[in-house]
Image (spheres, helix red, strand yellow):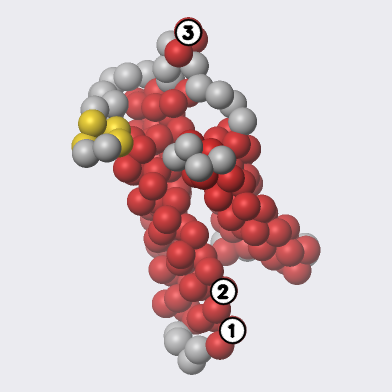
Amino acid sequence: MRSQFRLAIGLLAITVFVAVGTYLRLWDLHFSVGPFFLHHWLSIIGGTYLLIFVAMFGYMKRYTAVNRGKLLKVHVFGNLLAVALVSVHFAQQMGRPAEFGPDLGTGLAAYLLLMAIVASGFMMRFGLLTQQRESQRLVHVGLSLSLFIVVAIHALRNFGIL
């Protein structure tokens, strides 16, 4: 458990480092790869991973005989990697010059929800709030469902469908 905690903290530290570097334009991820910029692809990959594997995690832990310990590790560390990809996109967008600043609508709401989910998941997984575990789980699941809705609206709006 200690090594998992250290690994999770390390992933979060790397995410912060890469996001801050992206925000400050220490490296440029704003170049086209096919129809989108690289940072858009990173958020599409990270967001899609989250949407698919969070739903799969919920199903598998209830209805399959899979090893719950391994499943939880995949859930925690896979999601932290996906959060890192989404964070790069968010930092790229927020680091734009003021005259080209992003619309702070659904993207900001989605990212704030994502950070709240990471915080609540981190507290549950590593036992930082042991007294309120059941209410913490309710908050974590509720935030996750809210994120699904906000990300769907964000994607549909930014792909020009809504």
Determine which residue is flagged by label 2.
58
116 relative position to 4: left or right: right
Residue 78: x and y in percent read 40, 60
Amino acid on which disc 2 is placed? Gly
Q: Is residue 128 visible?
A: no
Residue 34: x and y in percent read 22, 39
Q: Earlier in the sequence, mark 1 or mark 3?
A: 1
Badge 3: residue crowd in 10 Å (few <14, some 14–19, many ≥20): few
Query: Residue drawn 40% across and 43% down?
Result: 43
Q: Is residue 126 visible?
A: yes
Determine which residue is flagged by label 1.
62
Query: Residue drawn 45% across and 66% down?
Result: 53
Amino acid on which disc 3 is placed? Glu
Indicate the secondary structure of the residue bearing disc 3.
helix
Indicate the secondary structure of the residue bearing disc 2.
helix
Q: Give the quadrant of residue 159.
A: top left
Q: Are marks 1 and 2 in contact (CB under 8 Å)?
A: yes
Q: Give the quadrant of residue 86.
A: top left
Badge 1: residue crowd in 10 Å (few <14, some 14–19, many ≥20): few
Q: Considering depth in this image, is 155 or 130 the residue closer to the camera? A: 155
Indicate the secondary structure of the residue bearing disc 1.
helix
Residue 129: x and y in percent read 70, 58
Q: Is residue 152 above or below residue 98?
A: below
